[in-house]
Amino acid sequence: MRLKNNVKHIIEGKHTTNIVGWLLALLGSAVYLLTMEPTVSFWDCGEFIAVSAGLQVGHPPGAPFYQLLAHIFTLFAAQATSVAAWCNALSALAGGFTVMFVYWSVLMLLGGRDRHTWTHHVGAVVGALCYMFCDTAWFSAVESEVYSLAMLIASILVWAMLRWYYCHDRHWSARWLMLVALLLGLGYCTHQLTLLTTPALLLLFIFKIVEQKKSGQPLPVVPFLSRVLPLLVLFFAIGLAPYLIIPIRAAADTPINQCHSGEWADVKAYLNRDQYEKAPVYPRMWRHHKNDALYAQSWNGGDTNVVGNLSYFASYQLTYMYFRYLMWNFAGRYNDRQGYGSPQNGQFITGWPFVDRSLVGTGKTPPKSLHTRGHNVYYLLPLLLGILGLGYLYRNKKMFWVVLTLFLMGGAILSVYLNHPCYEPRERDYAYVLSFMAFGMMIGAGAARVAEWLVAHAAKLHCGSTVAPLASAVLLMCVPVLMAFQNWDDHDRSHRYIAYDSAKNLLNSCDQVPQGSVLFCYGDNDTFPVWYLQNVENERSDVHVENIGLLGWRNFSSLLEESIAADKPIYFTHYAYDQYRSYFNDLFQLEGFVYRLVDTDGDSVAVEPSLRHIQQMGWHDLEGVYVDEVGCKFLEMYWRDMVLIANNMIDAGRSGDALWVLHKTLKEIPLHHLQDVTLRYKVGETYRKAGDGATAHALMTELDNVLDEQLRYFQTMSVARQKSMPYTLGPRVETKQLLNEYFANEQHSL
């Protein structure tokens, strides 16, 4: 009995809370550091690294506090090539320490400041780890983005306000509020997402005032605020101070400068995000781009009035663009493909076949050739724990409303503000990460309740007093362990260099000439990694890189005229080429991995320059590397170029060069990384035309087996479901027919 009491005292002691919290921070940081990308990633990451390393001005409204911290991290880089890794490490460490504050917050939600039982500790650990291993938090923690740091600040805000709520020393009470005010300012300088914690913080403030009034020791609100409020405003203003670097660095005219100048008019437009379209609260279907109305019809029932807007909000914005993401994180995910309302791509699943059949059309596990590492199942366990936890928190209605407010502000209410158009260019789950953090807290409460129930029932069965708590803790820990095992392979970017390689190949496809050349980009994924290479690693500074979308048509036209006058080679990335090819009557030639603007009609491929550029291009080893959808698109884009170049070489009687290009590309990018089965067929056909029948036959046979496997899987779905997937099934059926003809002709020739 004495030993039992000593163990209980140790577990429930204050030192245990601190020790476990720091151990969780170390574990989270270690996991994220081990799985983070070693260099630049796609989307905004390249820009964030570049503007942080050089203290430049990125896209509006900026993230100056993140930028300053990231700049400090980059100073530890021994060489330019490791700057990106150090910048990524900031997100990893921020994510790891967020886990600690989530754990501490759950403890206070369950037992106040000091009344922590071992079941509270178990629940808090489980909740913190479920958040740590959830899809969205992990994704943001392994790349140079602001969301991991924003969640660290948000988690400290919640923890600090809970500390204030449970603080009985009035001399220290105001200091917690000053910390909260400072963090709100710094959070705004990282991402405005952190401000969504404010309603929950205000609830805690109101609850404490009411509670003290009922206890007969009311807090004198007016004198308190008159004394403290000026200090809170001061500390909030200090937190906003990092924003001063925006006009200062804009006035210095840095190479990347999206504020244009330090003048107030430009700074105001920058902070207001004037360059972007702004979504109103109503109507919900506000955007009128090409096909927007057509896409929305499947969500609004064809009604554009109030009923249609409400239907669109409920079905698309709330269910598809928020609830689907919540289920990704705590129920399961079918694959990592961009969702456009299709029944499979981007859909959530549970791992229970009878449920998944209604979601994706079948309860069968996808075959290896369709199975992506983004296929994760948690059997609804984290979700059920979270729902149970919200009910358990209701015993303390104040904490119930605090957590529910945090959950709703970061989820459903944020969805009202964001007013997602149909469709987004990428999945937006990262925008709702605050809601997922709140759900992690609910999971912690649910796990604590289950632990209490298990021990209580074990006592009735006269089980050992030590065995029952240990067994229940192990059982509950299986939930985050399951999430870790399911998510590790698709969040491990430790050997991924696809964004880096694609950017380098774009630059190396441009001629190196004395007068310099110009490369026009369009979009984030072909621009920001190139910005990183030029601004951080000083690669190919002779190439003048511009994003047409940011440049504007007038400036684009002027720069184009200047470049032509100076006889500079002018290149377009694939995304820029797709957008503007019609403006130039297809006066383009493919050279390597870019399109060159030429002054006369001619061949669509420049064979000799392409061969020269390909010798300077390449890809890191992809063996065992997780290739996500964006990376796959760039690999497929590259393969299409190589196939086109090889076919032109064959037509020019240069089959030897064509085979060299094909062999080099096949070695660097094995075909199993490609989703496009039509492209895979073209690779085999090009090998056949080049005279390598053995390789062609091997590739065609492999593709035939893949298609047989995939079509058998799709046949497990109903006919109606198959008919609703023309873009998925159509190319596979057509390619299968082409393969049948290929093998028939091959057999006939024998």
Image (tube, helix red, strand yellow):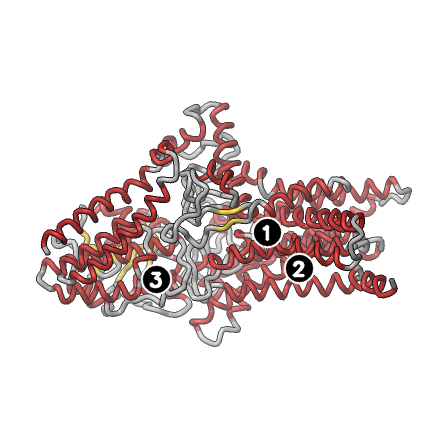
Q: Percent position (x, y) of residue 653? A: 8, 62
The C terminus sits in image quarter: bottom left
**Mark closer to the observer (1, 2):** 2
Q: Residue furthest right?
A: 216
Classify 175 as above or below 312: below
Q: Which mark is residue 503?
A: 3
What's the CA distance linking mark 3 and mark 1?
32 Å
Q: Nearer the viewer, residue 107 or 217?
A: 107
Q: Percent position (x, y) of residue 21? A: 69, 62
What's the CA distance linking mark 1 and mark 2?
22 Å
| Crowd tier of the residue under label 1, counting other residues whose Cα lies within 10 Å: few below 14, some 14–19, many 20 or above | many
What's the CA distance linking mark 2 and mark 3?
37 Å
Amino acid type of disc 3?
Answer: Ala
Q: Quadrant of residue 626?
A: bottom left
Q: Quadrant of residue 595?
A: bottom left
Amino acid type of disc 2?
Answer: Met
Q: Of label 3 and label 1, which has the lower sequence position?
A: 1
Q: Is residue 555 visible?
A: yes
Residue holding disc 1: 188
Residue holding disc 2: 100
The N terminus sits in image quarter: bottom right
In this image, 320 relative to 232: left or right?
Answer: left
Amino acid type of disc 1?
Answer: Tyr
